[in-house]
Image (cartoon, helix red, strand yellow):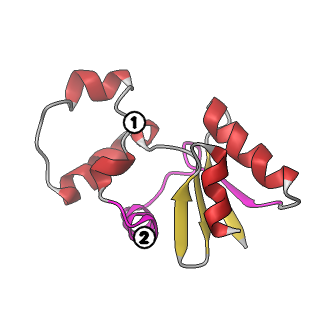
Amino acid sequence: MIKIYHNPRCKKSRAGLQYLREKGIEPEVIEYLKTPLSEADVKDLLVRLHKKPTEIIRTQEAIYKSDFKGKNFTDDEWVKILLEYPKLIQRPIVVKGPKAVLGDPASEIDVLL
C-alpha cells in the first residue's frame, strides 16, 4: 500500500497525487493538516526518508522566515516545531513499505514504484 501525506491546497502535493493516479495507483491519502501527525509519525517519516528534520522544512513559509530562520535547534526541537507548524513540512511525502520520498518533483515518486 502506498500512502501520500498530502495538502490539497498545495500545487506540488496535488501534482504528486495526480502522478500516482495516472500510474493506476490509488494511494491512502493522509491530509496531515486535518489529521495531525504524532511525534512518532514524524520521526518514522524522517527515518524512511533518510533525512534530518531541517531537510524537510519549507523555508519559503512566512512563519519559518519570521520565527525560525537562522536559529539553531536540535533535531528533537525541530520535530516539535514541525508538529506545532505542520505547514512547514515539505509535501507531498509518499511512503511505500520501509521507504519514503519527497514527491517534488512528482517524478521522484518513481523511486518507490
Kind of residue at badge 1: Arg
Left or right of 67: which side holds 38? right
Q: Residues within 10 Å of mark 1 (few under 14, many from 20)?
A: some
Considering depth in this image, is 20 or 66 the residue closer to the camera?
A: 20
Whole-percent x and y of residue 20? 77, 54
Q: CA distance from mark 1 to mark 2?
A: 19 Å
Kind of residue at badge 2: Asp
Which numbered tag is attached to residue 88?
none
| Start-end of magenta stretch | 26-51
Q: Residue at x 89, y 60 (%)?
A: 24
Q: Residues within 10 Å of mark 2 (few under 14, many from 20)?
A: some
Task: Work out whether mark 1 precedes mark 2 in sequence or the reverse, and give the earlier one.
Answer: 2
Pair 1/2: label in front:
1
Which numbered tag is attached to residue 44?
2
Left or right of 95: which side holds 53? left
Left or right of 62: which side holds 90? right
> Which quadrant of the view contains residue 63?
top left
Q: Residue 42, relative to residue 92: is it above or below?
A: below
Say which residue label 1 marks.
Answer: 58
Q: Residue at x 53, y 72 (%)?
A: 99
